[in-house]
Amino acid sequence: MSAAPSLGAALPALALLAIVALRLGVSRRSESNFRRLTLAMGAVGITSTVLAVLAPGFSLTASFGPMASIPVAGAVVSFSMFGGSLVSARLRKHGFMLKWPTVKTMVKRTLAGILMGLGALLIPGGNDTLLLIGLPAAAWQAALAYVLFVATLAALIVKLGSIAKAWS
């Protein structure tokens, strides 16, 4: 960006505010969960823009780097994430139940993981760099990657349908 940092970040921040306002206007008669999600994602976008201005070298994933040098950190983080998901499942209405996946499920999930990995290779820096740095910096490459990502997902949902359930 050739503009001064304050002006360069102000335009994407205003664009984010306009998108949040538009989504809130569209969701006025929708369920409250959609409005909460809109506000939460708007706050994430605006906060990342402010972070990009105030601390240009900040990266969420880079903050975890020093932790990786501690020998037991990986095991502790993995155990904590697994334990947190168990507690979260237990606190929800459906509880928690382990079951072995079918071969079909394993093949589908493996292929989905491969596709996700290929997608990550096509977006330099991954999703965090795309959403938290590329879009607020108004990089056309980030906008193009995001538009292609959304268009691909929309085409897949139209073609294959969606099994997503609404939040309750």
Image: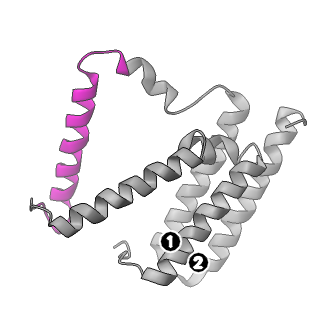
Question: Which residue occupies the foreground of this view, 15 or 162?
Answer: 162
Q: Where residue 55 appears, x then y in whole percent?
A: 67, 27
Q: Secondary structure at mark 2?
A: helix
Q: Main secondary structure of the magenta part?
A: helix
Residue for point 30% across, 60% down: 109
Amino acid type at mark 2: Ser
Q: Where residue 48 appears, x then y in whole percent?
A: 63, 42
Residue for point 37% across, 72% down: 167
Q: Quadrant of residue 82?
A: top left
Q: Which residues are magenta?
A: 68-96
Disc 2 + disc 1, Cβ < 8 Å: yes
Q: Secondary structure at mark 1?
A: helix
Considering only vertical position in the picture, is 90 above or below 120?
below
Which of the numbered marks, if any, corresponds to residue 151? none
Q: Where residue 148 appears, x then y in whole percent?
A: 64, 63
Horizontally, residue 92 falls left or right of residue 65, namely left
Amino acid type at mark 1: Phe
